[in-house]
Amino acid sequence: MAKRKKPQRRPTAPKAAVPAKAQATREPDWPVVVLALTGMAITAYLSFGSLFSASPLFCGPDSGCDIVQNSRFATLLGLPIALWGFGLYAL
């Protein structure tokens, strides 16, 4: 019986050196955090107005915003569009 040779391992490329600063925890990107929190506040306000108010909040009689907030395009799958936006900002 002939002896089988062990398969040789291929040499792997050395990993690139990662700077010590990159290995530590990363700080958040503060402008993005501020913009996301602002978006969350606006969409929370619009969602609250849509879900719990008969008339849109701070909407003047001739402004037309009530037409937009009460249109058929203001909901998706039975939930206000602003609530979907809030979820995306939270992500």
Image (cartoon, rainbow, N blue to C red):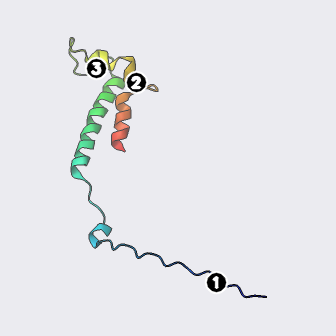
Residue located 26% across and 18% down the image: 65
Q: Is residue 77 left or right of residue 63?
A: right
Question: Hey, which quadrant is residue 56 in on the image?
Answer: top left
Seen from the viewer's position, the closer of residues 81 and 57 is 81
Residue located 27% across and 37% down the image: 39
Disc 3 residue type (three-letter): Pro
Answer few, some or many: residues within 10 Å of disc 3's Cα (few below 14, many 20 plus, some between 14 and 19).
Answer: some
Q: Is residue 43 left or right of residue 63?
A: right
Which of the two marks, 1 or 2, is nearer to us in this view? 1
Circle 2 SS class: strand
Q: Residue 2: where, in percent of width, then height? A: 75, 88
Q: Earlier in the sequence, mark 3 or mark 2?
A: 3
Residue bearing the label numbered 2 = 75
Which of the two marks, 3 or 2, is nearer to us in this view? 2
Answer few, some or many: residues within 10 Å of disc 2's Cα (few below 14, many 20 plus, some between 14 and 19).
Answer: some
Q: Is residue 62 above or below residue 17?
A: above
Which of the two marks, 3 or 1, is nearer to us in this view? 1
Residue bearing the label numbered 1 = 6
